[in-house]
Image (tube, rainbow, N blue to C red):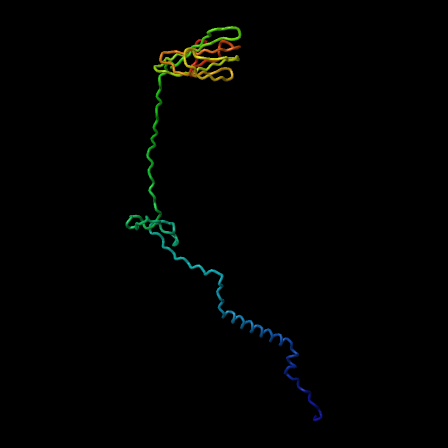
Amino acid sequence: MSGMRRAPRPSHGPVAIASSPWVVVLAGVVVMVVLLIVALGAYRGRSPAPDAGSPPPALPLPQVPPDPSGDPTPTSAGSSAAPLVPGLSPRASGLPSSGPAVSPTPMAGPTVTATRTPTRVPAGPPAVTGRYRVVQSFDGGFIGEVLVVNASGGPRGWTVRLEFSGGRLVTAWVEGAPQGTLRQFGGGFTYASGVDVPPGGSAPLRFHLERASTTPRGCTVDGVRCSGF
């Protein structure tokens, strides 16, 4: 019995830990969890600095109590008051301290349109008239006349207008009176008096026309048609 040797007992130190790898893994996980908890606590303990570029938070507006008059429309605190009359307070001017300003509207009166009735002048005989006639006819032409008569109560000037189908005007003149102004145009001429005709008087305008009909297409004195053709 004394010669028998006892087997050595296994050591429970590092050899046991090395032989059990799950113990090492579990210890590492516990250490990481502890470190994470400590880091979160330190982060929550810090107060974040306010951002200089961000605007400050908007303050809540005070609530306005409802209008006792029964108007369902809410009035915001930021709405502007009604404009007042310059130089007058609401009490002095008698205007309400709030509410829109009412400007007086001028009342339009009745529109009166003046109507004017035109005055009718009774038609009467023309002041100056003309009578056409042929004084002399010959081969290749003729001499015609327009006798201008003043039927008004005062001296009057006059203008004769004659139109023919073709022909050529040689000359025109007034018998026994100062001469007027002769103007020709295509197919005829006009003659304006050089002196007024006295009331009840007359002036014979004569003209020499070649290669034309003795009957004119038109004859007027101051726009009034001549007689005699």
Q: Which is nearer the eye, 216 or 191?
A: 191
Residue name at image x 47 percent, y 60 percent: 55
Q: Position of residue 143 (x, y in %)?
A: 48, 9
Residue situated in front as seen by the camera: 103 or 22 = 103
Where residue 28 sits, quadrant-wise, is bottom right
Quadrant of the image for the N terminus?
bottom right
| Location of residue 146 with respect to 67 vertically, above or below | above
Q: How many marks?
A: 0
* Occupied quadrant, residue 22: bottom right
Query: In the image, is residue 154 above or below residue 1?
Result: above
Q: Position of residue 71 (x, y in %)?
A: 36, 49
Query: In the visual, does 210 lie left or right of 225?
Result: right
- Residue plotted at (40% across, 57% down): 61
80 with respect to 51 (left or right): left
Q: Is residue 173 left or right of residue 98?
A: right
Image coords of residue 17 (percent x, y): 64, 79
Q: Residue furthest right?
A: 3
| Closer to us: 17 or 192 | 192
Query: Which quarter of the picture shows residue 176?
Result: top left
Name the residue at the left extreme. 92
Task: Name the spot of residue 24 as percent of width and height, x first.
Answer: 62, 76
Closest to the observer, 61 or 224: 224
Q: Is residue 103 above or below residue 191?
A: below
From the viewer's perspective, tell me whether residue 133 is left or right of residue 8.
Answer: left
Residue drawn at (52%, 70%), measured in percent from left and top? 43
